[in-house]
């Protein structure tokens, strides 16, 4: 079954909003083992929308249409899709009542145009009622977070799934209603594992799993780049969830073996900072950060983890040379001889940060985030990250590329990862 996505909204074409729905739906389809061959964005123009929907239904088995289901005149997705597929729309009393209840709970007036959203395919049933799976079938997808219901329309071997545009409505609707529908259509149970890797570039990661990808049948493997990380999703299909998970285990075991300490979790909900805090808790370690070019980004990520206050009490942002000297004890001679962006300065920042806070561990970051300030010897993107852990030190040199913000993000991730690896190394001895 081939899948295509069409995102509706002039605001997307103008760049007024970021299309996060595309990323979410692509990941979900990949996890379900559904190949997505095309994605399109079209504005709120009836003629162009009809062209795009016709083309999508002509070359794909299933089309996900996102946006344009609201109450205004330029919300045309449902009407145009129904016309293209030759499906009649009619007002549904159940949907009308749910609209009235939703608007009433918000304390808003019930305007006439809201009822436009109660128009659904004739004979449409609530999702989950699967009787009569042959021929023309339409289902209504409930929307607990907004007014516009979603729809599934099947006809002549083609399927259109219509979802609201706001991510806060689209995501729960997909997870609660569309995902079970898709799994029911396949007749199989899918189970996925996500291996999160840090400190390995996407190209290298892909090379390391290329033989597995070339030989894959079930389970399947896909890699994704994620802000200085690589996520590897493994998906298995079987008749039961137990069987699918059994198929996953050897593949996950092999990937963990290949990537070693670069794997920081196999749980989708765990972030790099959460993995680091878990290690701090396991070994009862206190931690400090000493940051220059990242301006506290590493510390901010740490404090986003609940319970971190038991292990992290202070972070230094020492942007100037004077602050590095005064707060962290970096020698003036070091700054003069090697400059602020050097392995020597990063080392003294880490040592000084740990001493100032009497912590077990301190990571330091110093570098040039750009866009200016670089030289031939020390280019923009050059970052030194130090780590002091109970008397043992390490300093790493990195050269990141991209915008100022990206370089800072990459550096913060690398700092957290260096702290994580240092703990693993220290307690393995």
Image (tube, helix red, strand yellow):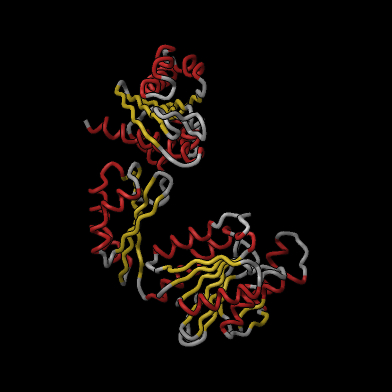
Q: Quadrant of the C terminus?
A: top left
Q: Position of residue 175 (x, y in %)?
A: 49, 63
Residue occupying the point 41% across, 32% down: 382
As rendered, which of 66 and 389 lies closer to the eye?
66
Q: Position of residue 235 (x, y in %)?
A: 33, 62
As rendered, which of 254 and 312 lies closer to the eye?
254
In the rendered image of this protein, does residue 330 appear above or below residue 260? above
Q: Position of residue 131 (x, y in %)?
A: 48, 84
Residue occupying the point 49% across, 39% down: 304
Residue occupying the point 48% across, 58% down: 23
Q: How many marks?
A: 0
Quadrant of the image occupied by residue 51: bottom right
In the rendered image of this protein, does residue 205 appear above or below residue 356? below
Quadrant of the image occupied by residue 116: bottom right
Residue occupying the point 26% across, 54% down: 209
Q: Position of residue 286 (x, y in %)?
A: 40, 27
As rendered, which of 347 and 106 lies closer to the eye?
347
């Amino acid at each position: 079954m081939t899948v295509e996505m069409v995102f509706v909204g002039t605001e997307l074409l103008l760049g007024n909003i970021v299309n996060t729905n595309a990323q979410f739906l692509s990941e979900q389809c990949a996890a379900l083992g559904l190949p997505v061959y095309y994605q399109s964005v079209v504005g709120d123009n009836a003629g162009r929308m009809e062209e795009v929907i016709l083309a999508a239904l002509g070359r794909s088995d299933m089309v996900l249409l996102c946006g344009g289901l609201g109450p205004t005149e330029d919300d045309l997705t449902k009407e145009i899709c129904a016309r293209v597929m030759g499906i009649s729309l009619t007002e549904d009393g159940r949907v009308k009542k749910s609209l009235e209840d939703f608007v009433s709970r918000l304390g808003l007036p019930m305007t006439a145009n809201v009822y436009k959203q109660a128009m659904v395919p004739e004979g449409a049933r609530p999702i989950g009622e699967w009787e009569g799976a042959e021929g023309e079938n339409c289902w209504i997808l409930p929307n607990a977070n907004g007014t516009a219901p979603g729809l599934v329309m099947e006809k002549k071997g083609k399927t259109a799934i219509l979802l609201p545009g706001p991510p806060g409505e689209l995501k729960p609707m997909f997870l609660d209603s569309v995902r079970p529908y898709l799994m029911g259509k396949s007749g199989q149970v899918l189970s996925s594992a996500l291996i999160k890797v840090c400190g390995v570039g996407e190209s290298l990661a892909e090379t390391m799993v290329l033989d597995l990808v070339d030989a894959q049948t079930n389970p399947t493997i896909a890699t994704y780049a994620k802000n200085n990380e690589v996520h590897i999703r493994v998906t298995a299909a079987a008749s039961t969830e137990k069987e699918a998970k059994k198929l996953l285990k050897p593949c996950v075991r092999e990937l963990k073996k290949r990537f070693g300490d670069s794997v920081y979790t196999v749980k989708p909900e765990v972030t790099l900072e959460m993995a680091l805090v878990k290690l701090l808790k396991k070994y009862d370690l206190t931690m400090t950060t000493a940051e220059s070019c990242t301006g506290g980004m590493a510390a901010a990520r740490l404090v986003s983890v609940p319970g971190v206050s038991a292990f992290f009490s202070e972070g230094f942002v020492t942007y100037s040379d004077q602050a590095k000297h005064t707060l962290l004890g970096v020698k003036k001679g070091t700054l003069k001889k090697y400059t602020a962006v050097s392995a020597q300065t990063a080392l003294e920042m880490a040592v000084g940060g740990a001493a100032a806070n009497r912590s077990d561990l301190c990571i330091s970051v110093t570098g040039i985030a750009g866009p200016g300030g670089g030289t031939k010897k020390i280019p923009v993107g050059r970052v030194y990250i130090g780590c002091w852990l109970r008397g043992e030190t390490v300093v790493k040199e990195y050269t990141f590329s991209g915008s100022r913000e990206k370089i800072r993000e990459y550096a913060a991730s690398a700092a957290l990862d260096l702290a994580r690896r240092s703990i693993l190394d220290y307690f393995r001895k």
